[in-house]
Image (spheres, rainbow, N blue to C red):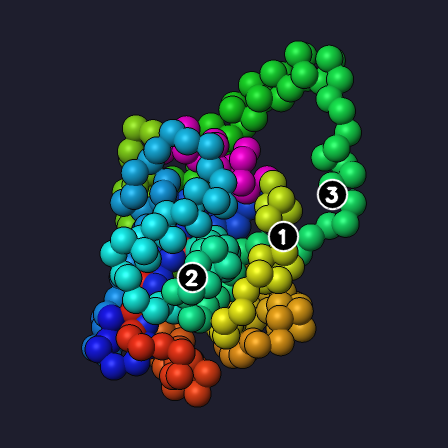
Amino acid sequence: MWNEQEGFCFCRSCSCRNPSHGFFFGRSASSRYNIPELAKKYKVYAIDLLGFGWSEKALVDYDALVWRDQVVDFLKEIVKEPTVLVGNSLGGFTALVAAAGLPEQVVGVALLNSAGQFGNPNSEAEESREETALQKFILKPLKEVFQRVVLGFFFWQAKQPARVESVLKSVYKNTANADDYLVESIIMPAADPNAGEVYYRLMTGFMTNQTKYALDSVLSKMFCPLLLVWGDLDPWVGPAKANTIKAFYPNTTLVSLQAGHCPHDEVPELVKSALLDWLSTSPLKTSLLTVRTNRSM
């Protein structure tokens, strides 16, 4: 935290992409160029979300509220001052949910190609259909067995160095920073004995039910300024989502960059400038007493 006016919190998660976006088990290596620079002016906290990076591979039912509570508790118990949350990918969505859950402390949110979807008006009707005995006792168990076999293969494939490198290069316009260090930082946490089970729970829980936590519902509970730093060349989360968020939430500043899914690692200087310029705006300067930098993407 900088001892003048503002602060950040980086909510970090990465994943080796398979059926959903993200880099599972990735850690904070993708923030390697931003944190040292921001720390010259700000106090920086970098959080690996539960189940990701060096955080515990806890055998729990993964849910957006688990990560929200983790970040909110960290802000209350450790940071204890006005904070700006910054997140990429799933870390971005977590930053939004945490900001909505702690409006008295979170004074700004910056999203870098964030995960999350806008609500489907038909989803509630679909979820309310009663489960039949055939579905409950035969089809559902068979589905779980099939999912475990398929996702077990996906997990094995996802942690192979060649696969990780291939995925990274597909989402980085400039692949220079999709290097061996970044690949290794994603692979290492996958060696945890619980990593495979965590992967299964993430993929069958939160990742396949993201519409349960709609962006419009979360944004409707927020009041603080929002910054979108968006890599327009992202094959997973393109510029259309950023434009939709800005249209829905007027208190939004959008900075578009010629980069992929992780602009903070691909064009770190441009991301740093966008963050610092945004922090210098009057709404944030008047609401922030100190500066905190904390790590989702």
Label 1 environment density (alpha carbons within 10 Å; few <14, some 14–19, many ≥20): some
Q: Which residue is under mark 2?
A: 87
Mark 1 residue type: Ala
Residue 176 visible, this orientation? no
Q: Which residue is under mark 3?
A: 123
Picture layout, residue 289 above or below residue 126? below
| Of the image marks 3 and 2, the number of the one nearer the N terminus | 2
Mark 3 residue type: Ser
Picture layout, residue 283 above or below residue 76? below
Q: Residue at x 63, y 52 (%)?
A: 214
Q: Residue at x 37, y 52 (%)?
A: 71
Q: Position of residue 187 (x, y in %)?
A: 32, 44
Q: Residue at x 29, y 33 (%)?
A: 192
The CA distance from mark 3 to mark 1 is 11 Å
Foreground of the two, 140 or 223: 223
The CA distance from mark 1 to mark 2 is 17 Å
| Of the image marks 1 and 2, the number of the one nearer the N terminus | 2
Q: Position of residue 11 (x, y in %)?
A: 38, 57
Mark 2 residue type: Gly
Q: Nearer the viewer, mark 1 or mark 2?
A: 1
Q: Residue at x 50, y 74 (%)?
A: 225
Determine which of the numbered discs, if any, sits on residue 268 in the image: none
Q: Which residue is under mark 1?
A: 214
Q: What secondary structure is the magenta-colored segment mainly?
A: helix
| Of the image marks 3 and 1, the number of the one nearer the N terminus | 3
Magenta residues (range): 195-208
Q: Quadrant of the C terminus?
A: bottom left
The CA distance from mark 3 to mark 2 is 27 Å
Residue 198 covered by magenta stretch: yes
